[in-house]
């Protein structure tokens, strides 16, 4: 056995771990700064012809009207069109990123996400019912949101109940999720088949995902729900880490595995539901943000969970900003854009770090 | 601390795996559990750790395991399974640190890091500490998992076939390590073993199981006899002491038609 300089070796290892952890804090800080920069850029982007000066004047004038002057037009565009959309993109991206990381951890499966578990399919079905059989008008928009939300939670309880019959395991949850995904997809396809051309178009558009209809009120609601769920999720980081070693080992380390798995799945689904009921299906963030993060800083959930949220926020904001500008004045649905910008980035990391990932 | 198992039984559905298993161990003892496939070794280990909830009583250090929380049990008992799952993108150091889970609420203290570092040094795997779990060999992984169990500071260490995936050198290293844990920490070690030669060499006592029951318990030299091997494994064997250690050399299955 190697006994040379044992005490020296110990402090060496401890310091190396501290350096290891410091890199992760650095990554978190870097993501935070990146998001701030992206906010700064995104506020200046848009189809309206505002200079950078006018944009920032409009922002500052809201807080210090005596210091800076702004035009009503600039103020309206920045405050009523751009800012809530930007912050909504961050909140939604954060929620989808962290929910994806939770699902991948809980199910010990790198392919798990709200999309692969049928949760998004359920939301689409909920929205489709209202679009095809709805009454039209303003009430219809609210009905779509409620239906999407309700069906998302229904799917979650469906996954839970189905897998309970076989015992709550990653395999049973994934299989139950896949069953529900096909069921809801088939029902949505049926609605599309019987719907009119206009309805079909609206359903399809909903499934692309969009941040077109955000508002300060919706932003507040999403931020509140995501904000309340974060501490609950983060406090279970160690349990999630332990569950990565297998259920029985996690149990031997003191984790109540079934209860933790069930609760985290419900929370992650709730976070997903409150976001996609407003935006439609944005599938890519929940799947890929955790992967990008894991490739960058490894799998310790204490860091992985918040960092996946930040990466998700940055991804969605970048995607939406590009979606608003590349074909301006036309706006591409953000669900399409997230894949276009996320995939090259993901591919780069995927190909560069071949070893030591899964 | 003393482990005392009384009238333990367990069933999967209506198939009974363990029938009325009773035994006890002394502190610092290494007890090997041997027996043919499906005799209930693994199930017994999982029942003692309350991964499964058995009938009967399991007491350790005078405490009934059924009365303790999972975290309290985790502070007393550590478990290393036979099939290892390694988690997504985890380094060796982080994996071992997981063993501190029963003691950590959120942040990692210097004491936790010191404990992990000490075990890493003890196992002489410093060079692997910040490698990913996917980048090390099967034998190294097994050592990491035992290290993870060691930083849990258990008074009872449960090992399921700790040497089954290892080459000869790693087998000896892991077994010597297990002996050292038992001696230095006065921890009781209970391990399922297939290899009777290793069992005979490294265990203080052996427990032989068949079809969910204990058929014999005693020192290796008492138990590893031609008759017992024949009864339990249905194999004709030669027992040799030539190497200075007891050796069981299986010759042929009993009752098989020979060509």
Image (cartoon, coloured by chain):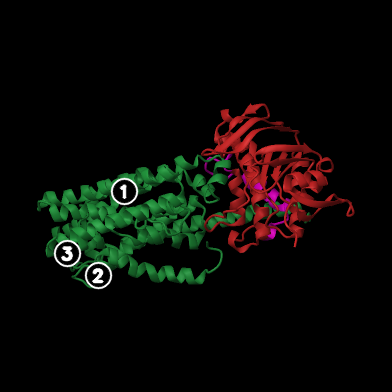
Chain colours: A green, B red
Give whichever of discs 3 and 1 has the lower sequence position: 1
Q: Which residues are drawn in magenta? A: B101-127
- Residues tagged 3 and 1 counted as in contact (Cβ below 8 A): no
* Residue found 48% across the figure and 72% down from its top: A351
Is residue B104 within the magenta segment? Answer: yes
Q: Nearer the viewer, mark 2 or mark 3?
A: 3
Name the disc covering residue A325, or none.
2
- Residues tagged 2 and 3 counted as in contact (Cβ below 8 A): no
- Judged left or right of residue B88, residue B145 is right
- Judged left or right of residue A69, residue A241 is right
Give whichever of discs 2 and 3 has the lower sequence position: 3
Instruction: Using the rendered image, report if marks 3 and 1 lie on a common chain.
Output: yes
Q: Nearer the viewer, mark 2 or mark 1?
A: 1
Label 3 resides on the chain identified as A
Assign a secondary structure to mark 3: helix
Name the disc covering residue A201, or none.
3
> Alpha-carbon distance for marks 2 and 1?
35 Å
Image x and y of residue B128, in percent: 66, 60
């Amino acid at each position: 056995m190697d006994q040379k300089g044992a005490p020296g070796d110990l402090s060496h290892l401890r310091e190396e771990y501290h350096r290891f952890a410091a890199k992760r804090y650095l990554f978190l800080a870097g993501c935070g700064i990146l998001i701030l920069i992206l906010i700064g850029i995104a506020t200046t982007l848009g189809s309206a012809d505002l200079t950078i000066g006018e944009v920032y004047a409009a922002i500052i004038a809201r807080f210090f009207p005596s210091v800076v002057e702004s035009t009503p037009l600039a103020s309206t565009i920045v405050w009523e069109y751009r800012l809530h959309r930007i912050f909504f993109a961050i909140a939604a991206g954060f929620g989808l990123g962290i929910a994806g990381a939770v699902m991948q951890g809980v199910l010990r499966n790198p392919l798990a996400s709200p999309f692969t578990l049928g949760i998004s399919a359920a939301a689409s079905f909920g929205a489709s019912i209202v679009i095809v059989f709805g009454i039209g008008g303003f009430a219809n928009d609210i009905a779509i949101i409620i239906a999407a939300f309700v069906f998302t939670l229904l799917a979650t309880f469906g996954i839970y109940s189905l897998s309970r019959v076989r015992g709550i395991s990653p395999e049973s949850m994934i299989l139950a999720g896949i069953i529900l995904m096909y069921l809801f997809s088939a029902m949505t396809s049926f609605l599309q088949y019987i719907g009119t051309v206009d309805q079909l178009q609206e359903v399809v558009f909903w499934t692309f995902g969009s941040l077109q209809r955000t508002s300060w009120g919706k932003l507040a609601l999403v931020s509140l729900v995501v904000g309340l769920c974060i501490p609950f999720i983060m406090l279970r980081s160690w349990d999630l880490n332990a569950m990565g070693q297998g259920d029985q080992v996690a149990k031997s380390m003191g984790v109540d595995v079934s209860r933790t798995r069930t609760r985290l799945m419900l929370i992650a689904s709730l976070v997903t539901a409150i976001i996609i009921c407003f935006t439609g299906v944005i599938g890519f963030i929940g799947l890929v943000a955790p992967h990008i993060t894991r490739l960058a800083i490894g799998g310790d959930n204490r860091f992985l969970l918040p960092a996946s949220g930040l990466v998700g926020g940055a991804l969605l904001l970048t995607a939406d900003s590009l979606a608003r500008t590349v074909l301006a004045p036309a706006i591409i649905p953000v669900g399409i854009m997230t894949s276009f910008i996320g995939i090259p980035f993901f591919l780069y990391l995927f190909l560069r770090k071949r070893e030591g990932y899964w | 601390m003393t482990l005392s198992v009384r009238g333990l039984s367990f069933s999967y559905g209506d198939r009974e795996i363990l029938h009325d298993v009773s035994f006890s161990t002394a502190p610092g003892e290494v007890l090997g559990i041997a027996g043919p496939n499906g005799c209930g070794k693994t199930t017994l280990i999982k029942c003692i750790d309350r991964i499964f909830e058995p009938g009967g009583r399991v007491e350790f250090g005078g405490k009934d395991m059924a009365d303790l929380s999972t975290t309290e049990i985790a502070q007393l008992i550590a478990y290393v399974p036979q099939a290892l799952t390694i988690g997504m993108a985890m380094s060796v150091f982080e994996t071992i640190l997981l063993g501190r889970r029963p003691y950590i609420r959120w942040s990692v203290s210097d004491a936790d890091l010191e404990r992990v570092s000490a075990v890493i040094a003890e196992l002489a795997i410093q060079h692997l500490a910040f490698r990913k779990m996917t980048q090390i060999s099967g034998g190294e992984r097994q050592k990491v998992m035992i290290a993870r169990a060691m930083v849990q500071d258990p008074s009872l260490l449960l090992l399921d076939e700790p040497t089954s995936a290892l080459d000869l050198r790693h087998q000896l290293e892991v077994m010597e390590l297990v002996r050292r844990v038992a001696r230095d920490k006065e921890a009781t070690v209970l391990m399922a073993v297939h290899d009777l030669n290793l069992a005979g060499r490294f265990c203080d006592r052996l427990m032989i199981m068949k079809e969910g029951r204990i058929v014999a318990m005693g020192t290796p030299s008492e138990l590893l006899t031609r008759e017992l091997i024949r009864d339990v494994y249905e194999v004709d064997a030669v027992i040799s002491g030539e190497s200075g250690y007891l050796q069981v050399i299986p010759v042929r299955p009993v009752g098989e038609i020979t060509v």
